[in-house]
Amino acid sequence: MKKTLYLKFCLAYLIFGFFGFIVVATFVSRMTYEHLRREKADALYKEATLIANTYASDLYENNTTLDTVKAQLDALDTYLSATIWIINPSGRMILDSSAPMDVEAEVVVEGFDPTITEGSYYTEGNFFNSFHQDMLSVFAPITSNYSVRGYVVIHYPIVSLQTSSDKLLSISYLMLVILFLLSLIILFFFTEMVYIPLCKITEATEQYADGNMHYEFSVDSEDEMGYLAACLNYMASEIARSEDNQKKFVANVSHDFRSPLTSIKGYLEAMLDGTIPPELHEKYLNILLNETERLTKLTNSLLTLNNLNTKGMLLEKTDFDINTVIRNVAASFEGTCRRKNIAIELLLVGDRLPVTADMGKIQQVLYNLLDNAIKFSHHDSVIRIETTEKRSKVFISVKDQGIGIPKEDLKLIWDRFYKSDASRGKDKKGTGLGLSITKEIINAHGEHINVVSTPDVGTEFTFSLPVCDTEDDF
């Protein structure tokens, strides 16, 4: 897999910086210049209007002298950094703030046309070839007796506007650079919070794809990345656990099949070669029969477990009396209990307690639980089977006074072929499938089974069944 995500993100970051520069150099530059030009034109127009209504108007009405007006214009020229003209409609220059006053030298602006502004109050250019550089020229008419007597024209160098625009633009460039550098924080957070965890997750998935389900990694994050990593770790651990269980399953099946097969083969060979005399054949044939029954029991348990795990398994649910089933199952262990001097105590609710379930499979559940209870109970002890009814549920418990189950084994007792160390000496004929089958049957009914156990005190299994909602006779 090509690792290009980080490269793409960095490339996008550089493209962002490049286009940011292009935007500032074009659109922002033009917008800044246009804003300064309009702002300068407005300010100059106000000054031209003020001059036209005061000094120039007084000049045309002979209320002041040329020298006085020239001095005022010179002062404004310095203040505004602009050239101020008073000009007649014919184009003849009256006053020029940028040149000494000379009444004898006539200066005429050739081709002067006040309509050059085309409805505006300013224009750009060399103003009828009067300047060697482009100027921003603002017009303000001088009126007297409802007629235009002349114009106040203020010229401001375009290069000065451009200089001011460039200064503001340099600030924009500086802000762009600062923003670009600050955006590195985003790149840093992306690297630390997304890219590095993603690399760890990618590496983990490659390890899992190669079959290394025991590969472990961690992402120290409380966000979605951390949750994804935790889920992936959990998934891998469950798959690894499933694989370990599968290997253990095959090993246990092989062991449990090999032991009786080895015995059968050994005894048959001994009988054929005369090691076992004919008068003892009946004894060893009975042993062989027991071994074949053990193989049959193991095979049936495996088939039962496989059928229970098949999706879409149909349960033959009927309404039946669970108390009757319990009594019948308990009666089938009478001989075994007599040999160990174990008493079975029944504490059942009412004479009849109808439930809805698959009666044959529930009989198997009770048989497995009671068989385990007898197998791991001490001599001269009591096994109690009790039923209680609560909230449309019947709870059936099987409680013994046996060796109990260690705390560390409680979560493993439902695994196939699992036998705790404490039970191995007492469960030589067991297959380790009884509780797995029991769990699967109860789960197939949509119910639950729980276990409570204390070593050397006893164990209690409790499972639930739905109460029958009809009043039919059984």
Image (cartoon, helix red, strand yellow):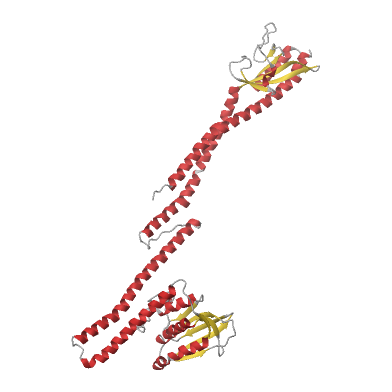
Judge from the rendering whether residue 54 lies leftward or rightward of residue 1; answer left or right.
right
Whether residue 431 appears in this view of the structure is no
Residue 72, quarter of picture: top right
Tell me if I can see residue 435 in this picture. Answer: yes
Residue lying farthest top? Answer: 104
Q: Is residue 99 left or right of residue 286?
A: right
Q: Residue furthest right?
A: 145
x and y, in percent, of residue 138 in the image: 68, 21
Is 112 on the left-hand or right-hand side of 260?
right
- Along the line of sight, the residue nearer the viewer: 262 or 369: 262
Describe residue 244's horizontal placement relative to residue 359 as left or right: left
Q: Nearer the viewer, residue 392 or 358?
A: 358
Query: As rendered, which of 136 and 290 lies closer to the eye?
Result: 290
Vertical position of residue 115 compared to residue 340: above or below: above
Q: Residue at x 48, y 56 (%)?
A: 225
* Quarter containing the C terminus: bottom right
Instruction: Residue 208: give x, y in percent of width and height.
Output: 38, 60
| Position of 47 relative to 284 (above/below) | above
Question: Within the image, what quadrant is residue 427 found in?
Answer: bottom left
Q: State how many labels appear.
A: 0
Tell me where residue 274 appears, x and y as whole percent: 18, 88
Image coords of residue 354 (percent x, y): 55, 85
Task: Give 199 or 94, whichever is nearer the viewer.
Answer: 199
